[in-house]
Image (spheres, rainbow, N blue to C red):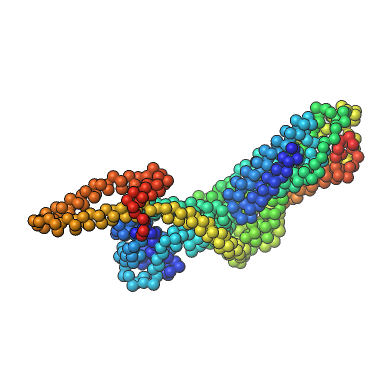
Amino acid sequence: MERQLLLGTMLAYAAAAWFFGKHVARTDDSSARRGKMSLALGFSAHSLSILVHLAAVGLLPVTSFSDGLSFFAWLIVGSFLVVGRGGRLSAIGVVVGPLAAIMVAGAVVFFGESAPIPPELRSPWLPIHVTLAFLGNAVFGIAFAVSLIYLFQEGRLKSRRGAWLLRRLPSLEQLDRLNYRCLVWGFPLLSLGIITGGIWAANTWGHFWSGEAREVLSLLTWVIYAGLLQFRLTGGLRGRRAATLTIVGFTLVVVSYVSISLFNLPGRHGHVLGS
Amino acid sequence: MALEVVIVGLNHHTAPVAVREKLSVGNGSVDSALAGLLDPPRVREVVLLSTCNRVEVVACCDSDANAGDYLADRLVEVGGIDRHAVEGSLFALRGRDAVRHVFRVASSLDSMVVGEPQILGQLKQQFEVASAADAVGPVLHRVFHKSFSAAKRVRSETGVAARAVSVASVAADLARQIFEALGERTMLLIGAGEIGEAAAAHFVAAGVGSVMVTNRTFESAVELARRFRGTPVPFERMSMYLPLADLVVGSAGGGQLIDSAEARRVMRERKNRPVFFIDLAVPRNFDAEINEIDNAYLYDIDDLSNVADENLGERRREAVRGEAIVEQEVDRFWQWFERLELEPAIVELREFADRVRLEELEKTLPRLAAVDEADRARIESMSRAIVNKLLHRPTTRLRQPRDANEEVSLVAAMRELFGLRGED
């Protein structure tokens, strides 16, 4: 049931990706509406799959690689549906759509029964820590999409090949501003995610920090975003450089999530908890 | 007999401006022109399209009558010129071609600059004028309303109007890709000459919030600034004001005014908030290197005209997709139009009744012994009155159907009951 729902979700997101692509490439406004509808439809199926999982397992779907991928995609699409409502911003769907479709496709491919959770991890801290950290990274996912579009459009403006400009994309100013807003929301969420993880670890094992790969990479990501925020606020960092750094930060998030899960690096963040 | 949409006129494809300007119908005379063109039952509905690129009569006519020739004559008459002055420039379209033409005109596919936005407004306005003058009936009403929705589809589903095709509008278009709201932006115009003034006017029309003008002769700067409710800036103080400007338009003589070092200083002072440098001057006012600086965008006059050319090509490519949409909409209209047999059916009914009346008169009148001309006339007029009174109610009712479905079934019932086969 859950897998079928995810399959449906993937198809709806793929359709949304196609419609947004058509909207942007062919300046076709009715496609934007269809794209948003497909995405909302996929999001409903996606939400249902999470409810089904919650009912069956009694936990948020965050305890296996495939579950986490799906939950992360769900948060990204949810954030986009909140952020990308107005006017030209909906064109960001041209990146969010494919991104979500690929992530859910990954969730479908790697779909498996969730392993039982070791008792020491059964804690009210689990949903709090994971949701905060995932939500923070999902907001950075939006910032990533926005930054990709920024670099693309900026490159075209600089090259002075006007015919290659995609006019349905938001203005550079709007993209940069949204990138900043994502940073302002995502950074505290990520910080809280890291802090709650530490408190949970301290409560369970008696130490805040154990130095496993996931923790180190998260801290590195945090430092990048902290620097980005700092220089944006004080040093006039904006535009192309800010977009590039945002992309680097999010790439690190993705690489650390995928590599730790797939290569089964030691630690409590592995692809099956406790294995 | 049936109804037909006919177009007669001339436009930029068929006639040079020297001919077009002869046959323009001024706004004041449109009402009388419409009255002069109407000629029921031959010409039942008329809308007059008159812009600087076209003078065309769109009419709904009896398809049997040779309405095209008649309309051409009257159009020339109404325009107050000699027919052979425009002979060879006039074109005529009928049926589907005529409907398609109206749809293409509304969608700006027939315009001189494909995709220009004014034509739809002009069409709407001239349709309103004709409606107000009672020159529009159900057929043209539908032709025009469907042409408006075809135009809306073409505009939103293709990029036919998406791209700017003049240097000034390309610049404004690019500015909108950089800045979100031009209303909060400040423009510095360097040089108060004609080119600068035209560019400034365009940006003000596009909604730029505030304008500063600088010029070597300060008086000209003051004068131009006053026109745009802007601020004049003394030429030697320009570098002080530069960091305040989001758009910098160069149109001054005398070559380079801002080098890349100066631009870097400006960007630092602005904390890298973006600047759009638009160089309209030849020789150029801004160092080409400025484009290499982060968050600074530089377009010179050649860059802008290249974009304009590319955009025009793109509009033409998009127009092909617009044509496909128009064809779909014409198809839809045509389905409706073919079902529109009400008027011909009523005419048929009247002709049938009249035939019966005449036959009976011919049978009866010779048998009557002493009838003089006056009696004959009375009997004939009585027969006409009977027919008219009998047909009055059914025809009135047929003309006021509750909806399209009822119209179709009423017409079918009438044909069935009177044995009319619907032959034209």
Residue B356 showing in the rendered view: yes
Q: Position of residue B86 (x, y in %)?
A: 36, 70
Q: Residue at x 14, y 52 (%)?
A: B378
In this rendering, would B306 be left or right of A55? left
Of A250 and A1, nearer the camera is A1
Q: Position of residue A212 (x, y in %)?
A: 89, 38
In this rendering, would B240 be left or right of B72? right
Q: Residue at x 74, y 34 (%)?
A: A52
Q: Position of residue A160 (x, y in %)?
A: 65, 60
Image quarter of the N terminus of chain A = top right
Residue B140 placement: quadrant: bottom left
Residue B95 placement: quadrant: bottom left
Of B402 and B52, nearer the camera is B402
Considering every residue shown, the one lying at the far front of the view is B367
Residue B263 showing in the rendered view: no
Q: Position of residue A226 (x, y in %)?
A: 78, 41
Number of marks present in the image shown? 0
Q: Residue at x 31, y 53 (%)?
A: B349
Of B229 and B289, nearer the camera is B289
Residue B5 placement: quadrant: bottom left
Image quarter of the C terminus of chain A = top right
Query: Is residue B306 placed above or below A107 in the rendered structure?
Result: below
Q: Residue at x 37, y 44 (%)?
A: B401
